Image (cartoon, rainbow, N blue to C red):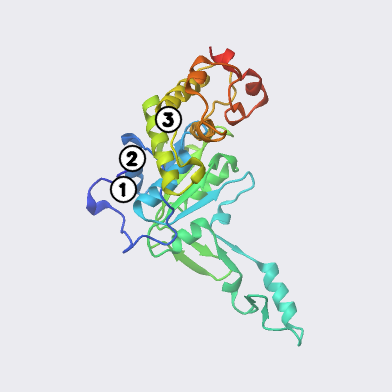
Amino acid sequence: MRFFTGNPENRPTEPEAIHAECPGPEPYLPSEELIKAVNLSIFLKRPLLLEGEAGCGKTRLASAVAHELGYPLYRWNIRSTTRYQEGLYEYDALLRLHDVNLLKDVNAKAKEGERTLNPRSINNYLEFKELGQAFRNDCPSVVLIDEIDKADLDFPNDLLALLEKPYEFRVRETGKTITANYPPIVIITSNKEKGNLPAPFLRRCVYYFIEFPKRDDLKKIVEIHFQQMAEQGDEATKTPPSVDLVDAALDEFLAIRGQKGLTKLPGTSEFLDWLGALAHFANQPYSAAALKAKAGELPYKELLFKLRDDWRRAGFAASS
């Protein structure tokens, strides 16, 4: 995929070997423009903000980048109640108090199961989370902040202080400041669930909108996807779909996406699931000729349509 193809002097310091927490191979086909956006983000040490319809590959990009560079990946899933501190660390004060009370019992043991009871050491009650762990690593890391727009409007701006120099945060319970030796590569996804993100936050991001793949790109994605599944030893899908079935499925899938009135268009992941079912779910592959002729009900429509109104519209008649 050739991520970060710019001046070698500007590359982030690489670990001596691939990190143990580096994700496995990701069947991802980035465009040259997307590769350039990733490179700019790394070069400028700014977050990469991704937008695009569901299923276009925003989330999977982080895994692909981490694998390509050999770095660990941390995924921070954002909720409506998320605060920026939650991505740094958690301090379990209740567990510490529990241990203090437990050790007052003269008959209590020094261990409870596999856990050492030592309330004198605050580190036993600290757990560093996705962004906090990335700051503490001895090599660069990739951090995916997924669906940032779900959080409160103050969340993006609060996050900015962490993602700029001096790249540090303070652990209030210990009074220590943790400074990142290797600022993480941060990839942020947004679906605009609550409208536009704050302007100060947008100014500090590298922005990229991922277009839905064209037909030729989808065909390449299919090839990479099923090749990887075969390499992973998945017996159920070891034989890739035939060329005729792939072509017929692509034609029908793109016709479905071209329909007017659909609330949620099926994405790449839905297409791969659907094609896998066409090729392997029954005793024999679904007939490419039948798919081209639009004979009968649309097969396995439950893999493509996820909303009631779209489900009701599903069928060959709608795309004829």
Q: Are marks 2 and 1 in contact (CB under 8 Å)?
A: no
Q: Which residue is under mark 1?
A: 43
Residue 296 place in picture, x, y as percent: 60, 17
Instruction: Between label 2 and label 1, give the one nearer the viewer.
Output: 2
Quadrant where the image shows the N terminus: top left
Dot 3 lies on which element? loop
Identify residue for label 2. 35
* Nearest to N terminus: mark 2 or mark 1: 2
User: Mark 2 or mark 3, which has the lower sequence index?
Assistant: 2
Q: Amino acid at mark 1?
A: Phe
Relative vertical location of residue 98 with respect to residue 236 in this rendering, above or below: below
Mark 1 or mark 3, whichever is nearer to me: 3
Please tell me which residue lies in front, 141 or 278: 278
Q: Nearer the viewer, residue 301 or 103?
A: 301
114 left or right of 147 in image = right
How far is mark 2 from mark 3, CA to CA? 31 Å
Which of the pair 10/114 is nearer the observer? 114
Q: What secondary structure is marked by label 2?
A: helix
Could you tell me if residue 308 is visible in this image? yes
Answer left or right for 259 relative to 73.
Answer: right
Q: Which residue is mark 3?
A: 242
Q: What's under tag 2, amino acid-wise?
A: Ile
